[in-house]
Image (cartoon, rainbow, N blue to C red):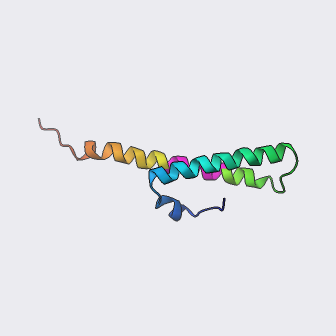
């Protein structure tokens, strides 16, 4: 998969982010296999994919967290 910019990733829905996450995790597994069999041209690709996975997971947590806490933040408690 090609590396996406953060602005492009932020525009995706949670469902699309989860699909992208599973694709990137599969890509990471393939890269690790290639690395262990000395078929990987650039080991830096593993680091790049790991960081992309972390970015996607962070955005998923942020979007899911904001969806669950938004109604509670609006609610005003009366004395």
Q: Main secondary structure of the magenta part?
A: helix
Which quarter of the rendering shows the N terminus? bottom right
**In the displayed structure, does residue 55 sit left or right of residue 40?**
left
Q: Which percent across, then down, holds residue 14? A: 45, 51
Q: Residue at x 83, y 52 (%)?
A: 40
Q: Which percent across, then down, holds residue 72? A: 26, 42
Q: Which percent across, then down, holds residue 20? A: 57, 52
**In the displayed structure, does residue 68 sit left or right of residue 1?**
left
Please say whether residue 56 is one of the residues in the magenta stretch. yes
Q: Which percent across, then down, holds residue 16? A: 50, 54
Camera-side residue: 7 or 12?
Answer: 12
User: In the displayed image of the protein, which residue is found farthest to the left?
Assistant: 79
Q: Residue at x 69, y 50 (%)?
A: 27
The residue range painted magenta reads 50-59
**In the displayed structure, does residue 76 sit left or right of residue 44?**
left
* Picture layout, residue 65 above or below residue 49: above
Which quarter of the rendering shows the C terminus? top left
Please say whether residue 37 is one of the residues in the magenta stretch. no
User: In the displayed image of the protein, which residue is found farthest to the right?
Assistant: 38
* Picture layout, residue 72 above or below residue 56: above
Q: Residue at x 80, y 52 (%)?
A: 43
Q: Residue at x 57, y 64 (%)?
A: 5
Q: Which image quadrant is residue 48 in? A: bottom right
């Amino acid at each position: 998969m090609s590396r996406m910019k953060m602005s492009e990733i932020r525009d995706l829905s949670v469902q699309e982010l989860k699909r992208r996450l599973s694709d990137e995790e599969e890509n990471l597994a393939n890269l690790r296999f290639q690395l262990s069999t000395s078929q990987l041209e650039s080991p830096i690709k593993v680091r790049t994919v790991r960081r992309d996975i972390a970015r996607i997971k962070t955005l998923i947590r942020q979007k899911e967290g904001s969806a669950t806490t938004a109604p509670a933040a609006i609610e005003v408690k009366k004395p």
